[in-house]
Image (cartoon, rainbow, N blue to C red):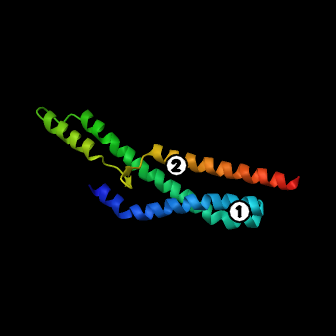
Amino acid sequence: AVLRKVSDSIEACVLVLIIVVMLVVPIVVLDLGVSGIRGAAMLSMLPGGLVSIGVLYMLLLASSVSEKCARVPALLNAIAFGVGTEQARQQTVDYITSSGAGFYILSMRLTTSVVVKALYICGIFVVGLVSRLNADSHGMAE
């Protein structure tokens, strides 16, 4: 319950950070394509890159919390609490399983696979953008 409240409280901030990263990465790639790779251009893009890496790290940490919460029922089942506690243990495991503990964004559980899929989609977009810039620059050179 505490993790859900925390997720609800910081959900808007996390969404803004995700949107910023989704906008910063293509802008940095576009800027590199337009201005070229020089020392001054690379230095000016460093803050955007650091923010993007920080947000990605934050999302991976939040998703690891969800993954750890998913393993708690199996851990409780493995622990022997003594004779006559099987029913109480099973009820506790059922409660934890049905509560769906984890970090949620827009009512969607944030897992490592969700973060990796989003990173993959962003990577595809960046690669497409780079190839488009490369094709345009070769087309202009001819």
Which residue lies most toward the top here? Answer: 83
Q: Is residue 76 left or right of residue 43?
A: left
Q: Are marks 1 and 2 in contact (CB under 8 Å)?
A: no
Q: Would you name the residue on which mark 2 appears?
A: 118
Q: In the depicted view, which residue is nearer to us: 129 or 14?
A: 129
Q: In the depicted view, which residue is nearer to us: 72 or 139?
A: 139
Disc 1 and disc 2: Cα gap in Å?
Answer: 22 Å
The spot of residue 120 in percent (x, y) is: 56, 45
Q: Which mark is residue 131?
A: none
Q: Residue at x 70, y 65 (%)?
A: 43
Q: Is residue 104 left or right of residue 96?
A: right
Q: Quadrant of the N terminus?
A: bottom left
Q: Secondary structure at mark 2?
A: helix
Q: Would you name the residue on which mark 1 appears?
A: 31
Q: Quadrant of residue 11?
A: bottom left
- The disc, 1 or 2, on the residue closer to the chain's N-terminal end is 1
Q: Residue at x 21, y 34 (%)?
A: 80
Q: Residue at x 78, y 50 (%)?
A: 135
Task: Residue type at mark 1: give it.
Answer: Asp
